[in-house]
Amino acid sequence: MRWYVDGMNVIGTRPDAWWRDRHAAMVRLVDLLERWAADSGEDVTVVFEHPPRPPIRSTVIEVAHAPRARADSADDEIMRRLAADPQRASAWVVTSDRWLADQAHAAGAAVESSAAFRDRLERG
């Protein structure tokens, strides 16, 4: 099963001053996702609007970004990837954005809120 994660939505679920160091918050999320994916056996793609600088590399999950950074570009990239996924009926999309949730559901994917998913990650 593939999980497409709207990275900044998940980061934004906790008021832990992530905005002071966005890159460090992205690294922390990737670390959480790697542990969860390794433990659960799930395939994970986390999508950010901007490419992380410096790049964040992972051998466990896919770290992706939109081709051009702009408002909602991560949402568009998630939908592009979901539309190209031949197994989208078994995919999950993690987001707090109503538009993306509606589009993903219409494409046949299941949707989980960013807050619920963050709770799942932190429970282990």
Image (cartoon, rainbow, N blue to C red):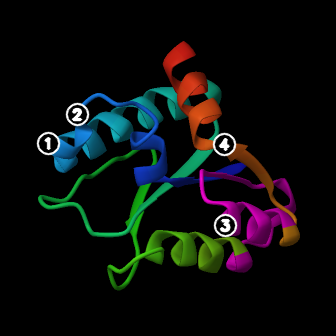
Mark yes or no: residue 124 visible: no
Which label number is shown at residue 113? 4
Q: Tell me whether circle 2 and circle 4 mark residues in contact (CB < 8 Å).
A: no
Could you give the CA–CA distance between mark 3 and mark 4, rounded to whole angstroms? Answer: 11 Å
Q: Nearer the viewer, residue 69 or 59?
A: 69
Instruction: Name the residue at the top extreme.
Output: 123
Q: Nearer the viewer, residue 78 or 95?
A: 95
Identify which residue is drawn at 22% across, 45% down.
Answer: 19
How many residues crowd mark 1 within 10 Å: few (<14), some (14–19), many (20+)?
few
Q: Secondary structure at mark 2?
A: loop
Q: Earlier in the sequence, mark 3 or mark 4?
A: 3
Q: Secondary structure at mark 4?
A: strand
Which label number is shown at residue 100? 3
Q: Secondary structure at mark 3?
A: helix
Up-down relation of residue 32 to residue 80 (above or below): above
90 left or right, relative to 28: right
Q: Nearer the viewer, residue 29 or 58?
A: 29
Could you give the CA–CA distance between mark 1 and mark 2, rounded to whole angstroms? Answer: 6 Å
Could you give the CA–CA distance between mark 2 and mark 4, rounded to whole angstroms? Answer: 21 Å
Q: Which residues are magenta?
A: 83-105
Q: Tell me whether circle 1 and circle 2 mark residues in contact (CB < 8 Å).
A: yes
How many residues crowd mark 3 within 10 Å: few (<14), some (14–19), many (20+)?
many
Could you give the CA–CA distance between mark 3 and mark 1, rounded to whole angstroms? Answer: 26 Å
Could you give the CA–CA distance between mark 2 and mark 3, rounded to whole angstroms? Answer: 25 Å
Q: Report x, y in % for residue 118.
A: 53, 31
Q: Which residue is mark 2?
A: 17
